[in-house]
């Protein structure tokens, strides 16, 4: 009699959580930044429940603080800053995103997201500082562009996304180059993270 395959038991707290960004910056005098979006990715073969916790919940409104993510999908979580008092400048708050299987209560994984609050003029001052630094002759070589390793990583991720997915029959590409949806999700996550970081800098 053939034994049924059993899904390996997941250890509490050890499941990697894929969420972007990992830091939220709110500028008190720029209302467009008072609404931020966290994207939670689920590259796994099973659905996940999520819950958003915060060290100072009175300062924020989280739209859909609890919910579920289907396998190999993602969901956006909207966070609104509703307390912009000057006394909170420079204060660091933390959000914690916990995930678990839909049929279980224990948290399989967690990720902390740091929240900072600044004035817009601090942001402008930082931008001016970086522009001046980039203009200095001794930094031209270091700031000329992304490293070869970074460019290579980006090319690999793009190539991975262009390869056929497992199960596609009508393809001239060898079967060993067919990638699973999970692998493509990871490649997409790495690529999006890279471009977001490059945009911020």
Image (cartoon, rainbow, N blue to C red):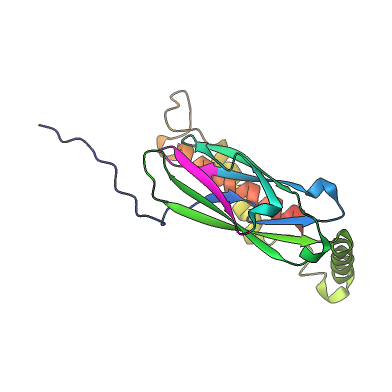
The mark tally for this picture is: 0
- Kindly report the secondary structure that dominates the magenta region of the rendered protein: strand
Residue drawn at (41%, 57%) of the image: 14
Q: Residue at x 48, y 27 (%)?
A: 171
Q: Is residue 52 left or right of residue 104?
A: right
Residue 104 position, x and y percent, is 37, 43
Q: In the rendered image, is residue 188 in sight?
A: no
In the orientation shown, which residue stands out farthest toward the front?
Answer: 58
Which region shows up in magenta?
Answer: 41-55
Q: Using the image as rendered, state which of residue 96 and residue 4 is in the foreground.
A: 96
Which residue reaches farthest left?
1
As rendered, which of 88 and 32 lies closer to the eye? Answer: 88
Placement of the N terminus among the 4 image quadrants: top left
Residue at the extreme bottom = 138
Can you give x and y, in whole percent of width and height, for residue 19 in the image? 58, 49
- Residue plotted at (77% across, 59% down): 201
Q: Is residue 185 visible?
A: yes
| Viewer-proximal residue among 30 and 145 | 30
Q: Is residue 64 above or below residue 129?
A: above
| Residue 156 among magenta residues | no
Asked if the stretch drawn in magenta spans residue 54, the answer is yes
Image coords of residue 156 (percent x, y): 57, 48
Please say if 66 is above or below 30: above
Q: Position of residue 64 (x, y in %)?
A: 60, 39
* Picture residue at 72% right of the left edge, 66% below the top: 91
Residue 156's place in the image compared with 63, above or below, is: below
Q: Is residue 167 left or right of residue 131?
A: left
Identity of the residue furthest to the top in this view = 170
């Amino acid at each position: 009699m053939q034994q049924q395959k059993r899904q390996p038991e997941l250890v509490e707290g050890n499941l990697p959580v894929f969420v972007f960004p990992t830091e939220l910056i709110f500028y008190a005098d720029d209302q467009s930044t008072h609404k931020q979006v966290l994207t939670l990715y689920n590259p796994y073969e099973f659905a996940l429940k999520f819950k958003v916790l915060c060290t100072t919940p009175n300062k924020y409104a989280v739209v859909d603080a609890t919910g579920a993510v289907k396998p190999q999908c993602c969901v956006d979580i909207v966070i609104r800053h509703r307390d912009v008092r000057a006394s909170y400048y420079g204060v660091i708050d933390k959000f914690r995103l916990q995930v678990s299987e839909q049929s279980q209560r224990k948290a399989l994984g967690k990720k902390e997201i740091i929240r900072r609050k600044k004035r817009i003029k601090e942001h402008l001052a930082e931008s001016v500082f970086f522009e001046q630094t980039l203009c200095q002759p001794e930094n031209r070589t270091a700031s000329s562009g992304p490293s070869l390793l970074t460019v290579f990583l980006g090319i690999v991720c793009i190539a991975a996304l262009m390869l056929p997915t497992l199960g596609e029959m009508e393809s001239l590409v060898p079967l060993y180059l067919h990638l699973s949806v999970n692998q493509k999700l990871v490649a997409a996550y790495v690529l999006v993270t890279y471009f977001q970081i490059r945009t911020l800098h």
